[in-house]
Image (spheres, rainbow, N blue to C red):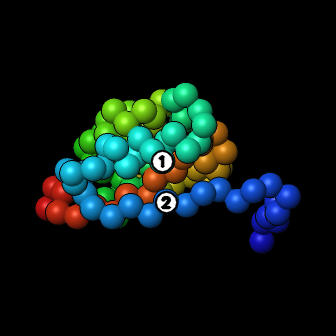
Amino acid sequence: MPSLDYKSKPADIFLIAGGPQSKNTKAILAEVLKSSQKKRPTSLISATASNDNKEFFLMLSQILMDAGAGNVTLVPIVRRFDPAKAKDICSRVTLSLSARRCGFGE
């Protein structure tokens, strides 16, 4: 089991409900990104519920970039999972988003 570093402040967790077309999605994500106190924070998307669907990732990454994110990366969990690659990606980002797909491409 990996050791946890309790010396640093735990990351803030934001739970956001609604879909990509919800009325305030961009404004809410902009506030979340602003909380990182970085100009264009790097972000990752874990899209396991969409089976790492590329179109879904591209849609969400554009929404994040419109809200102020810098580089957005997909962490492949379902189709081409590589634990070392996933750990490397996770170590380099400011914000991670776990997306639950609802009705996309079905």
Contact between marks 2 and 1 (CB within 8 A): the answer is yes
Is 31 in front, or is 53? 31
Among all residues in the image, which is located at the extreme left? 106
Q: Is residue 19 left or right of residue 82?
A: left
Query: Residue 73 location in percent, x, y?
Result: 47, 39
Callout 2: 10 Å neighbours few (<14), some, many (20+)?
A: few
Q: Is residue 15 left or right of residue 41?
A: left
Residue 36 position by quadrant: top right
Q: Count of labels shown?
A: 2
Query: Residue 35 location in percent, x, y?
Result: 55, 44
**Which quarter shows the N terminus?**
bottom right
User: In terms of secondary structure, where does tag 1 sit?
Assistant: helix
Q: Work out how far the residue at label 2 is from the one at label 1, CA to CA, in angstroms.
A: 7 Å
> What's under tag 2, amino acid-wise?
Phe
Residue 91 position by quadrant: top right
Residue at image position (80%, 55%) is 8
Residue at image position (49%, 42%) is 33
User: In terms of secondary structure, where does tag 2 sit?
Assistant: loop
Residue denoted by label 1: 32
Q: Is residue 68 left or right of residue 10?
A: left
**Which quarter shows the C terminus?**
bottom left
Residue 62 position by quadrant: top left
Query: Residue 55 location in percent, x, y?
Result: 25, 43
> What's under tag 1, amino acid-wise?
Val
Numbered tag placed on residue 48 in the rendering: none
Among all residues in the image, which is located at the extreme right? 7
Residue denoted by label 2: 14
Residue at image position (46%, 53%) is 97
